[in-house]
Amino acid sequence: MATATSGLEAIDQTRSAQPPRPSVIYEWLTTVDHKKIGIMYIVYALLFLVIAGAEALLMRIQLAVPNNHFLSPQVFNQLFTMHGTTMVFFVGIPVLFGFGNYLIPLMIGARDMAFPRLNAFSFWLSAFGGILLYLSYFAASGLYGAGSAPDVGWFAYAPLTARVFSPGHSTDYWTLSVLLSGIGTTATAVNIVATAFCMRCKGMILTRMPLLVWLFLVTSCMVFVVVSPLTAAQIMLCIDRYLGGHFFDTQAGGSAMLWMHFFWIFGHPEVYILILPTFAFMNEIIPVFSRKAIFGYPAMVAASVGIGFVSLGVWAHHMFTAGMGPAGNTFFVFATMVVSVPTGIKMFNWLATIWGGKVQYRPPMMFAAGFLFQFLLAGLTGIMLSVAPFDWQLSASYFVVAHFHYVLVGGILFSLFAAFYYWYPKVTGRMMNETLAKWHFWLFVIGFHITFDLMHIPGLLGMPRRIYTYEAGRGWEVWNMWIGIGAIIQTVATLIFVYNLVHSYFRGKEAGPDPWDAWTLEWATTSPPPSYNFAVEPTVTSRRPLWDLKHPHDTDSSYE
Amino acid sequence: MTQTAAIPFNGTAETPWVMPNRGIVAMWCLIAAEAAIFIIFVVAYLYYIGKSLSGPYPSQVLELPIFGTICLLSSSITVHAAVSAIRKGNTRACSLALAATVLLGSIFLATTAMEWHHLIYDEGLTIKTNLFGTTYYSLVGLHATHVIVGLLLLFTTLIFSLGGKVREEHSERIEVLSLYWHFVDAVWVVVFLVVYVLGR
């Protein structure tokens, strides 16, 4: 270390002094290491992704032909409730925070999060929430013998959730599991903000922070003002159900609209909480595979903060059909349209990053390209739905379902797959198989477009969401059949992906510390990184510390 | 917190590298999240003013809790005194100020308890009675819960302080605690205005 030790070599000089290793299970159950917690978040989310995906598949089988009796109406209600709740609270949030947990300390040159024990606490709280939700299948009958899993829909509109209409304990399981996971999410967000502000390595001023960390910072700040209203609303629902309160009790003067407002104050910005981290992945992946620095770093940061603020004022576009009056409708139409401005800035910046670059179509970049195309289309149907009269026609139809699945699957899931292929070598030390990755990509793209492009059409033909079956002769049959076929293709593609994850862990090619020739600090340490990340705390002088290291005669710091 | 062993990437930076205190940043984040929860309860309270279908109504049963309010707001001054005392290394003054804070906070909690006892047993207002009862007990109760949490933390710190375990180097931790307590006091100002001034 006496002479100029480069960041790549200064990794690990303290390995000789390791304590005796405890058993593997004990180690994982008690760990406070941000990397292990991150991996646990991701694995836990993948398990729930498989469960919730299976629920979706069951629903598509039920709807594939008219007058089907594969599932009973009650089971169908439980399935769409569990599918939505699981995907949002126990897949989307954990998988994104898992990546955040793993990457943020590595990217800012820190050894751990600001509060490692709080980190473990919030993971176990969220995990317990997910387990509690599924425990409802076995335990929710309670004394009344009515219902098992929650069946009130993922937004659980009042007064359906009142004791009278939801006897038994299924709704309580929904409330409590969402409440718990919300507290866990808030605690993680506190941790991420404190980490990004207080743990940066020497030289990493805020304007040199990787965009991924910036976007997680914005997301976490949104969590404070967005998840808390949901927590408050769930407390109110608990008061109504357990203590006999009247918040959402229309018989005693309470208001069902209030629940809608409170839920969507959470519910809409929640979409941005899910999409901003996936923008963050794009911000890291697109430049590396275009071999260019990101275009418009300050504009990207400003646009993210802008999305964060604007998204707080658009929630009631979910309520155009609830009767808010012309003033409210007009406001929320325009507020919603304004969100597309900062989002458009991001889109153009990504395109400008690709423009003129030497694009390498490795698996992460393929999924990134899919993301850009599909997220654009999803945004366009979003602008259509933001127009109140259009929404009056299509609210609660399959057009809406198609729109938000286009965002969640075509946008978020594609970006997540890109992130998996990009950071898998760092986490495991091995590359994922590229042939399987290409099969995964093309099958998933085809399946995705069959399912979700075609799903817009029955919506336009008037098929409402949440119906468990329909009569023949309405022109919906053929579309639903194709949607089901697309779902099966996507399932096959996902199975290939899961097989690839497992297979590459044992048989994959050795990755080395920096397989993609990337520029951020996580690639400066070994793959997988040691528990202390960096033996010597790094110092950075620009936004691309590894570029500076690899090109000492042409450093970024001379331009910034 | 920040080690200064530098990898000479290209030249060494000479300026000291100081990051903000993580406890204080985290407490501000927690305050933001808690404030959002309170805002939702306050909105529900405001929305349901005058919408109760049956009595008792706020104008009939609520009285201004002047004494408790004065005690709670003064406790912000004493907790601030505790922070400035420990910054100067004056542990005795810190213990004294902490004890005063705990006492004032407990008096506030006692006045709330007496008010609730009066409302429940003399006026027959419970959380089930009407919308006023539901919103009143949940909003004031949510605040009282935060007072209890704050008092537990303050009391623990006081015990440590009396045992001589709180010293000058812990001043930032005491500051984190005082931030929380200031927040609880600030929320009371809002609750007071909403429940006892606007809602009556």
Image (cartoon, rainbow, N blue to C red):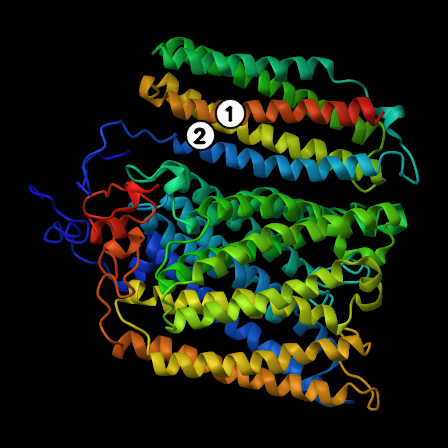
**Location of residue A475 in the rendering, given as x and y in whole percent from the top left corner:** 80, 87
Quarter of the figure with residue A510: bottom left
Residue at point 9% right, 44% down? A1
**Location of residue A5 in the rendering, given as x and y in whole percent from the top left corner:** 12, 46
Residue B22 vs residue B72: left or right? Answer: left
Q: Tell me the distance, in whole angstroms, between the alpha carbons under discs 2 and 1.
A: 8 Å
Residue at point 78% right, 27% down? B195
Residue at point 86% right, 45% down? A327
The C terminus of chain B: image quadrant: top right
Marks 2 and 1: CB-CB under 8 Å? yes
**Location of residue A128 in the rendering, given as x and y in whole percent from the top left corner:** 50, 58
Residue closer to the observer: A458 or A338: A338
Q: Amino acid at mark 1?
A: Leu
Q: Is residue A258 above or below residue A488?
A: above
Name the residue at the right extreme. B54
Q: Chain of mark 2?
A: B
Residue A160 marker: none
SS at mark 1 in the image: helix
**Location of residue A430 in the rendering, given as x and y in whole percent from the top left corner:** 27, 71
Q: Is residue A409 above or below residue B148?
A: below
Residue closer to the observer: A172 or A103: A103
- Whether residue A420 is visible, yes or no, is yes
Residue highlighted by disc 1: B179
User: Which tag, 2 or 1, sits closer to the chain's start?
Assistant: 2
Q: Is residue A460 above or below residue A196?
A: below
- Whether residue A127 is visible, yes or no, is no
Residue B140 vs residue B59: left or right? Answer: left
Quarter of the figure with residue A144: bottom right
Name the residue at the front extreme. A356
Residue highlighted by disc 2: B24
SS at mark 2 in the image: helix
Residue closer to the observer: A215 or A490: A215
